[in-house]
Amino acid sequence: MDEVGVLAPATVSNVVCGFDCLGFALDEPCDEMRVRKISEQTVRIVHLDDHGLPTEARKNVAGVAALALLEAAHPGFGFEITIKKNIKPGSGIGSSAASACGAVVAANHLMGGRFSEIELLEFAMAGEMLASGSRHADNLAPCMFGGFTLVRSSDPLDIVRLDFPDVFATVVHPQIEIKTSEARALLPQQVPLADAIKNWSNLGAFVAGLAQGDHELMSRSMLDTIVEPVRKSMIPSFDEVKEASLSAGALGGGISGSGPSIFMLSRDSETANKVGEVMSTVYSRTGIKFFTYVSAVSAAGVRVD
Amino acid sequence: MDEVGVLAPATVSNVVCGFDCLGFALDEPCDEMRVRKISEQTVRIVHLDDHGLPTEARKNVAGVAALALLEAAHPGFGFEITIKKNIKPGSGIGSSAASACGAVVAANHLMGGRFSEIELLEFAMAGEMLASGSRHADNLAPCMFGGFTLVRSSDPLDIVRLDFPDVFATVVHPQIEIKTSEARALLPQQVPLADAIKNWSNLGAFVAGLAQGDHELMSRSMLDTIVEPVRKSMIPSFDEVKEASLSAGALGGGISGSGPSIFMLSRDSETANKVGEVMSTVYSRTGIKFFTYVSAVSAAGVRVD
């Protein structure tokens, strides 16, 4: 086999009380990538979109991830990666994670699958490092494995795949730019122990809610008194979107990644669609351009075409 | 029915990364309590042990809990509570919780079971309040429901009963006194966000490990960089007990409640017994009097005889 196509899904990380560890994969949007063997032992990037991302492999997230794999494997050939990016860069729904995971899954497929998924995650982390400046797998893990994942530790990498019931996500992506560095700067260095306890009690309960398929428990546990209060000011109409979504029946939600997207979870697709409508109503009034997505939480990660 | 006997189990709270929310019930030791109806609308306490606990109902944990129930229910009679306390007061394995839960479960039984378990917990909290000065259900919840429980919120009370696999506990109780107020004073008011994230990632993973019956994951997740480092100095030979236990095959463990007991979890009873032996070896050298307990984690809470 000399060529393969993959679909790499969007992902939501920093799932409310699961800041810096909990994420999930969407069914869509997905980046579409085709990877083919080339005789040069290098990585070439071709873009089929107009996002203006770098084509130099060492400056491109997919390129860096594929190069990391190439340097570990020395397969005697290289890869040309053609990317149609449907997940907008800077949206906060794992655009760079999709590039990195898609590239290494496809490349590994062309090498007969010699690396495990967790090894592939390590290569993909090199790509995320380029994008965010830090070694983290919050979006990579759900993109690779699908479903809800928990990064118990990023060094050494320890990913927990969580059981979960049918659940649907609605995402609104207002077209504003949030620099990751600015979002990071808003985080407190220290937090009150009482708030930390509240947060881990809620995360423990949320994981139990997922495992038991208890949507009501999931809903009660989606509270964050640490990060959301300091970051929500970056996102216009955040409170209004959240209140309208909860009134429309959403279980809960918050900032996706470090924003600007806002996500909500719902028990069924009808509610998720209704949540999409109220999100649109709120943002229509602001004059800010926006996109909405409604999708099942996907049990699958990167899919080989 | 005019009289009933109950067994109220010992419990471990502050389970490593589950500080202030996660606890579990032991099969034994159990307090033995008999409660009988009396015509006076009050509560009388009779002790069958020599722990020197108060006999005045308003100063006794079981008495205060039973009075709270009595005042809510006005059944037209009162209760005489006879207690044989096998769980030593001040041991850190839920002695006061057993008194409080046992009293209200037995009294409720004599009233035809008109209150739900969660309502009974509210009455039992009045007893815990007397014992510890704070409204918390970390030991009460596993004592009432059995198994592993997570207190998602104590106001309003929201208890999550967790799925869990077969697992065994070993407890060593060194005969020293730790005042809860002193243990509280050691806690930091603020914690680094990075430590808090590590903690909730581990708690999320531990709950997933319980749900999936993954003992290895439970083991990797039993880490605490927040409370254990500041409190372990209260307990002689803590590090030595922990290291020896892990070497003997324990999955992990830490301080039970606010000490002085140390608990360890093991995959099977053979390992749990071996852990008991190494704990004994360590403490034998210290000259401190101690007790050890080996018990399955019990799926049952307070049991009516």
Image (cartoon, coloured by chain):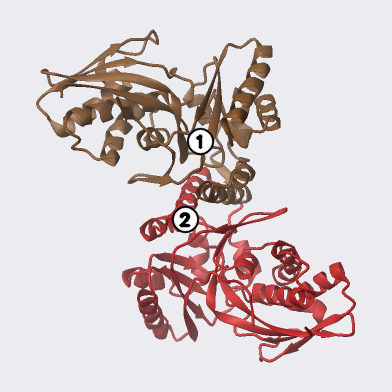
Chain colours: A brown, B red
Q: Position of residue B68 (x, y in %)?
A: 81, 70
- Look at mark 1 in the image and give the residue it sits on: A14
* Three-letter code for the amino acid on which mark 1 is drawn: Asn
Q: Residues within 10 Å of mark 2 (few under 14, many from 20)?
A: many
Chain of the residue displaying label 1: A
- Give left or right: position of A301 versus A42: right
Q: Nearer the viewer, mark 1 or mark 2?
A: 2
User: Is A4 in front, or is B282?
Assistant: A4
- Give left or right: position of B220 versus A82: right
Q: Position of residue A161 (x, y in %)?
A: 40, 45
Chain of the residue displaying label 2: B
* Three-letter code for the amino acid on which mark 2 is drawn: Ala
* Rendered-image quadrant of the N terminus of chain B: bottom right
Question: Is B211 drawn above or below residue A33 in the view shown?
Answer: below
Q: Which mark is residue A164?
A: none
Q: Position of residue A108 (x, y in %)?
A: 21, 31
In this rendering, does residue A52 appear at all? yes
Q: Quadrant of residue B270?
A: bottom left
User: Is A96 in front, or is A187?
Assistant: A96
Q: Quadrant of residue A100?
A: top left
Q: Are marks 1 and 2 in contact (CB under 8 Å)?
A: no
At 48% from the left and 44% from the top, the residue drawn is A164
Element assignment for label 2: helix
At 50% from the left and 49% from the top, the residue drawn is A211
- Look at mark 2 in the image and give the residue it sits on: B211
Question: Is B131 drawn above or below residue A112 in the view shown?
Answer: below
Element assignment for label 1: loop
- Give left or right: position of B55 versus A139: right
At 58% from the left and 68% from the top, the residue drawn is B146
